[in-house]
Amino acid sequence: MDALVEVSGLTKRYGGTLAVDGVDLKVLPGEVYGFLGPNGAGKTTTLRILTGLIAPTSGTVRVLGGRPGDAAVLKGTGSMIESPAFYPYLSGLDNLRLLAEYAGVSRQRIDEVLELVDLTDRAKDRFSTYSLGMKQRLGVAAALLKDPELVILDEPTNGLDPAGMRDMRRLIRELGTEGRTVLLSSHLLGEVQQICDRVGIINAGRMVAEHNVDELRGEQELVVRATPKDTAQAILTRFGSVHQYDDTLRVQVDPAQAAEVNRVLVEAGIAVSELHTTERALEDIFFELTTELSTGEEKTDVG
Ligand SMILES: Nc1ncnc2c1ncn2[C@@H]1O[C@H](COP(=O)(O)OP(=O)(O)OP(=O)(O)O)[C@@H](O)[C@H]1O
């Protein structure tokens, strides 16, 4: 399967700051890929390079088989990098019309994208009257106008309230299920876990890990609080390795087996007062990796 985005040894230096430091990245057709990292990790810089907005210092970058910024690549890529810029005094619809005219897109496609981002009812209102969530969704609509194969979204839920985040996540999942390839950045673990198929973790300009989100889910643990604890622990070892954490037991077992674990414990006369899954897996990996690196070599090179 040919990757839609293929980045190798990508580096970007701003004066003395190494913003991106030898990043390798592959985004495969049809996947929703999450580019996860804390603020300042180098996500926006990488996405700006992929969309041809800035040039890399070194490394190779292929997007849709071509170079970022090439006409054919631009045609097949829709993006929203940082806050989308629109004319505040024009309606959402008129803003899209302007972009559509420039890109040679039909009126029908404008209606389709407005429908997709759930802005049909407010399309004729001025952009300045939109909520932040609506502004971001219009940004996604603009990115989708050309019916692109690849959609690149930089922190699409940033600054949104919980309802706005939910709508945006739903929209991105929809894009994924309709077969589009999506590359998005985020600093939110839970978000990436909810909407992405694969995740690349970046910290201090370096890719520190790449995971299949399903595998990570499988690595989740069950948290069990039960008495008597010793007997519970002995029973739980049948399901997977068990370790104690505070006064709970943590079992490495597929969370889908939670009901079965509960049944077996209760049938053995154990009182179960708490049983839930934990999202520690991705969090642990993330913090382990980012702490390791941030205490390691400095990313700022003043030489
Ligand atoms: N135009 C620029 N000039 C100088 N330094 C820059 C520039 N753009 C980014 N940087 C620096 O490069 C590093 C990476 O920034 P980048 O914006 O790519 O990170 P990010 O992961 O997108 O973080 P955020 O979510 O905060 O935007 C930071 O140290 C930032 O200060």
Image: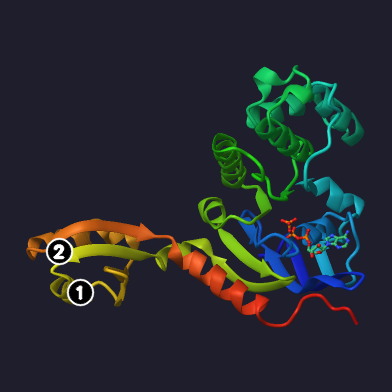
Whole-angstrom CA distance, mark 1 to mark 2, is: 10 Å
Quarter of the picture containing the N terminus is bottom right
- Callout 2 environment at 10 Å: few (<14), some (14 to 19), or many (20+)? some
Task: Of the two numbered discs 1 and 2 on the same chain, state the one appearing first in sequence.
Answer: 1
Q: Which residue position holds label 1?
A: 233
User: Which color scheme is applied?
Assistant: rainbow
| Image spot of residue 100 (x, y percent) | 85, 31
User: Between residues 133 and 181, which one lies in front from this camera angle?
Assistant: 133
Q: Is residue 59 visible?
A: no
* Residue 234 sits in quarter: bottom left
Residue in the image at 72% along x and 20% along y = 123
Identify the mark at residue 265; answer none if there is no mark.
2
Horizontal and vertical percent position of residue 97? 84, 25
Ligand 1 rendered quadrant: bottom right
Q: Classify the position of the C terminus by image quarter.
A: bottom right
| Percent x, y of residue 274 | 24, 57
Disc on res. 152: none
Instruction: Say if residue 72 shows up in the picture.
Output: yes
* Residue 105 drawn at (x, y percent): 83, 31
Is residue 229 placed above or below 94 in the rendered structure?
below
Decide: few, some or many residues near mark 1? Use Cα within 10 Å; few <14, some 14-19, many ≥20: many
- Specify the quadrant of the image occupied by residue 121: top right
Secondary structure state at the residue bearing disc 1: helix
Q: Is mark 1 within 8 Å of ligand 1?
A: no
| Left or right for 176, reference 277 | right
Q: Does the closest atom of ligand 1 sit within 8 Å of the Cβ of label 2? A: no
**Image check: 169 left or right of 221?**
right
Vertically, is 132 above or below 283? above
Compared across the picture, whether 245 is left or right of 101 comes to left
